[in-house]
Image: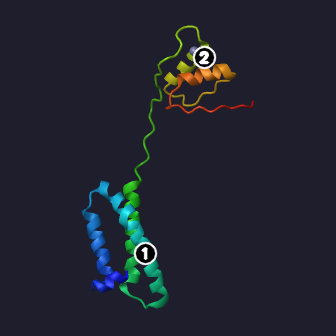
């Protein structure tokens, strides 16, 4: 902030310049500006405002500074946080490599995987059959082993 004085700019000028530059950027470039520059700038700017609040009288920067911080952080968050994805109405999937015919475990697994509504299934099986079921599932499925009950 002290460099600002030597350039004969007010801090208010600087935050106006920064906001003008932010508004010119494409949305996809804004996160990079925040991580490479704005984050460090805001840290120093907060320190500057804190220092001012302890030593100086009231000036427009004391009012505009916190508003600027809010706008920058709000803009960053709004840009980064996307709407919650809509849950699919059909959860059915297909998996390859299930045993054809007489394997009851694969038949149960197929019924679960192809169900449009069922999202969780418990298979009460011992280790050998559990490993068989695990071998049929890829990384899109989350498998947990419940060892009690
Ligand atoms: Zn099988």
Residue at 26% over, 61% down = 25
Give the camera-side residue of 33 and 68.
33
Tell me residue 100's x, y (percent). 52, 10
* Residue 63: mark in rendering: none
Q: Residues within 10 Å of mark 2 (few under 14, many from 20)?
A: some
Q: Quadrant of residue 88?
A: top left
Tell me residue 75's x, y (percent). 37, 62
Q: Provide the residue designation for mark 2.
A: 105
- Identify the residue at the far right of this view: 149
Helix, strand or loop at mark 1: helix
Q: CA distance from mark 2 to mark 1?
A: 61 Å
What is the count of numbered marks? 2
Residue at 52% over, 16% down = 98
Nearer mark to the viewer, of 2 and 1:
1
From this view, report whether residue 143 is shown above or below residue 46: above
Residue at 48% over, 26% down = 116
Q: Is residue 123 left or right of residue 58?
A: right
Report the colour scheme.
rainbow
Helix, strand or loop at mark 2: helix
From this view, report whether residue 145 is shown above or below residue 105: below
Residue at 35% over, 58% down = 32
From this view, report whether residue 60 is shown above or below residue 149: below
User: Looking at the rendering, in which quadrant would you find the C terminus?
Assistant: top right
- Ligand 1 within 8 A of label 2's CB? yes
| Ligand 1 image position (quadrant) | top right
* Residue 44: mark in rendering: 1
Tell me residue 38's x, y (percent). 37, 67
User: Looking at the rendering, in which quadrant would you find the N terminus?
Assistant: bottom left
Q: Quadrant of residue 133?
A: top right
């Amino acid at each position: 902030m002290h460099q600002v004085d030597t350039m004969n700019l007010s801090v208010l000028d600087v935050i106006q310049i920064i906001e003008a530059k932010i508004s010119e950027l494409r949305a996809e470039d804004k996160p990079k500006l925040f991580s490479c520059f704005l984050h460090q700038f805001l840290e120093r700017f907060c320190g500057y405002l804190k220092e001012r609040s302890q030593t100086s009288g009231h000036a427009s920067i004391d009012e505009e500074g916190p508003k600027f911080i809010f706008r920058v952080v709000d803009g960053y968050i709004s840009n980064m946080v996307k709407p919650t994805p809509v849950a699919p109405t059909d959860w059915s999937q297909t998996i390859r490599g299930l045993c054809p015919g007489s394997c009851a475990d694969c038949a149960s697994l197929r019924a679960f995987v192809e169900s449009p509504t069922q999202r969780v299934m418990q298979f009460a099986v011992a280790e050998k059959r559990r490993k068989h079921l695990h071998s049929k599932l890829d990384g899109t499925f989350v498998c947990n082993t419940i060892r009690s009950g």
